[in-house]
Amino acid sequence: MKIRVENFMSLMQAHRYEIIFGLCTLLLAYIIAMAIKKARSNFPPGPMGLPIVGYLPFLTEDLHLDFMKLGKKYGDIFSLKLGSQDIVVLHGADVIKEALNKSELLGRPRNSALDRYNASSAFFSSNFKLWKEQRRFVVHSMKDLGLGKTKIEEDVMDEIKHFKDVLRSHKSQPIDVKEPLSPSMSNNICALVFGKRLEYDDPSRQFLDKTIDEIFEYFTQTPPDVLFPWMQYIPFVSKFLKSDKPRNAFHKFKKFFQTELNDHLKTFDPAHVRDFIDRYLVEIDTQRAKNTDTSFNHDMLMNNSIDLFNAGSETVRTSILWFIYIMAAYPDVQKKVQKEIMEVIGSEKTPEYMDMRNMPYTHAVMLEIIRWKTIVPLNLVHCALTDTTVGGYNLPEGTTVIANFWAVHHDSRYFDEPEKFKPERFLSKDGKTVVKSSYFMAFSLGRRVCPGESMAYLETFLYFTSILQEFDIAFPDGTKPTFNAKNIITYRLEPYLVRFIPKN
């Protein structure tokens, strides 16, 4: 055996130049073939990458920043190969608007990370018909249950009272505000879905918070076993890549929601709808009475509830964590917001969502924080349902498309000095009116726009004003803001400590 290895090594050494030449020829052939393929198909341009792995080795965790660099080189729409997949990235505002308003691009890719982790989801799976039917119901249900009226606002304000009790209990000492904020935000969805809130130390409350964290800590839109589908057939690879963690979290969620559903079924009264679960149960009965082929069933109810919890808890929590951090980093802005709160709301009256109409500076600060630290830098992947064009390029059916909202929000073509925190950019010259830019796209665009946008604005405004009405926010002595964050699905701040000092 030893002699054979030595002979093989000698042979390799003797023909090393031929081998190197052969490999270079293969690489050159690959590059030429890829270039010809793109030229013939009028596919968006982009970097070649390497055989098999594509451009993957050149990307970091900060995909939104990597895509920005590529956009500056290749233009507002470009493509790159990640593993076995061709991804088209939308970098400029105009092509994003064009693409996300096209009915041909409303799909989700098959076998994507979203589809694989929760294939039954109406919002994140590749089943387009299912999405249309369920989205319409969810949006109408949220309105029926009180969104835009007083019901949901009252539930949110009740939860804020509990949250502020926790802040007071720390008596101006530094705290990791994420710990009480996580159950508080999730309780707002609890009130909507279950018709009740859960105490912070309730085991069910802690289970929900832990499971949501597991999903968002390990979930990514570009996991290796999706970019290289053959990996899923290798034993234990999902454990090694930790891609099993969000999948297992989804399964645990389903068991929990099954218990909640069973409890609701025991006390369900269609004449007295208490929450989203009841509202959905009514719809199931309505659809069955029509004898129609419908997607409304108990399993879909649980999937919708899980989607509401995940999206509604994580994105708004991340937003408010940024609001708190930036107010501590910019005390002069904080004082201006507090001044407006005192002028419009006062120190005794409870903030109401309708107050925002009379608080242009506070509203502008909210918009600027959401722009500056775009909470979801890259939108969830879309897929071409049929052959189409965007920006003059051909996108064949099945093409995966992703929009870089961070790039738009940090592009000097659309926002003056985009790297700076300037709330005034969203105000009229006299400072009395909010002027919302048409390039502001924090909640996506088109028919796939986030269905919880109104709920998110309501929550962020009420938390923001309620906190600043009662507290000054400051970092511990000697702390300097770093704005360190990482992009998972949301742009998450690294853990930080902050003080809530009662104003009185």
Image: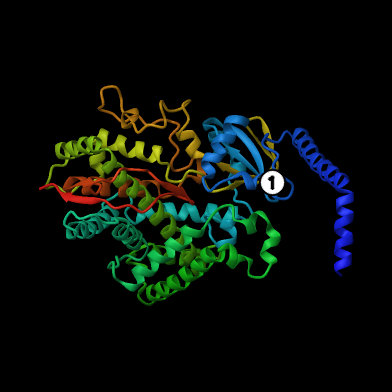
Q: Does residue 485 appear to the left or right of 47 in the view shown?
A: left
* Residue under the point 38% across and 75% down: 263
**Residue 143, how many percent across, how many down?**
36, 52
**Residue 237, how many percent across, how many down?**
63, 66
Judging depth in this view, the residue of 369 and 287 nearest the camera is 369
Q: Does residue 119 appear to the left or right of 315 in the view shown?
A: right
Q: Does residue 70 appear to the left or right of 167 in the view shown?
A: right
> To which residue does mark 1 refer?
54
* Residue under the point 26% across and 56% down: 175
**Residue 467, how many percent across, how many down?**
22, 49
Q: Where 202 sits versus 27, above or below?
A: below
Q: Quadrant of the N terminus?
A: bottom right
Q: Residue furthest left?
A: 504
Q: Where 493 sits versus 408, above or below?
A: below
Judging depth in this view, the residue of 319 and 102 nearest the camera is 319
Q: Where 403 sits versus 125, above or below?
A: above
Judging depth in this view, the residue of 300 and 423 nearest the camera is 423
Q: Quadrant of residue 171?
A: bottom left
Q: Does residue 290 appear anywhere in the picture?
A: no
